[in-house]
Image (cartoon, rainbow, N blue to C red):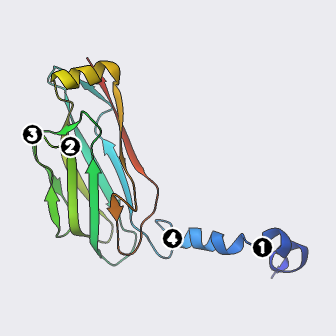
Amino acid sequence: MDASPFIGPGWVANQGKVGPAFINAATSENGACGLPKVAKSFDKADIYLGGTDNTATLTIQISNGTPVAISGVNLTDNLPAPLQIGSGAVSNTCTGGTLAAAQGSSAVSLTGFGIPSGGCSVTVPVVWPNTDAGRQACVNTPSVTNTITPGTDFVSPTGQVNTPATAPLTCHA
């Protein structure tokens, strides 16, 4: 066994690096601690305002790489202006909890839910409204990025991978 990274000159070069490396590996999504992670995407990159193609489906995926369910998790997704929850089915495959995503609102909330082993997802129809404000935003700021910030918008009692989940969407007038 080569112990040189831990003694003599090798230790001096590696001091302060070994512990954090083990911690980072253990607390990653697939590490020994298996922290849950949130990711998100839209089913399309572009919305065409005023047409029949002005709705996109937002999918929020929550991973759980452990063999045990994680309970007591909270998730909030505040859509960037001018996006709103559209008409259609709002669903999730997580366990328990309370899902709120009212048509016309700009927030999705799932509180007190469980993440089964292997993970779960939330699916929401999103629309870029064809209103004065929506048309103005489509011209002035045609691209928006929807972000969930772990530790604030996604909180698990076991901790979570703290990489923000983002999904871009572009409007065409």
Mark 1 residue element = loop
Q: What amino acid does circle 2 point to?
A: Ser
Q: Which residue is mark 4?
A: 27
Q: Where is mark 2, residue-wise? A: 106
Judged by depth in the image, the label closer to the viewer, 2 or 1, is: 2
Mark closest to the chain's N terminus, 3 or 1: 1
| Local secondary structure at mark 2 | loop
Disc 3 on helix, strand or loop? Answer: loop
What is the distance, in whole Å, between disc 2 and disc 4 at their CAs?
A: 32 Å
- Amino acid type, residue under disc 4 in the picture: Thr
Q: Secondary structure at mark 4?
A: loop
Place residue 160 in its image quadrant: bottom left
Query: In this picture, is 38 found above or below 31?
Result: above
Please rate how many residues cluster around mark 2, counting C-alpha atoms within 10 Å: few if below 14, some from 14 to 19, many from 20: some
- Mark 4 or 1: in front is 1
Residue carrying label 3: 87
Image location (x, y in percent) of residue 25: 57, 69
Whether residues under marks 4 and 3 lie with C-beta atoms below 8 angstroms apart, the answer is no
Three-letter residue code for mark 1? Gln
Q: Residue at x 43, y 69 (%)?
A: 35
Query: How many residues crowd mark 4 within 10 Å: few (<14), some (14–19), many (20+)?
Result: some
- Distance of label 4 from label 1 (alpha carbons): 20 Å
Q: Quadrant of the N terminus?
A: bottom right
Q: What distance separates the C-alpha of mark 2 from that of mark 1?
A: 48 Å
Eyeballing the image, is 63 above or below 166? below
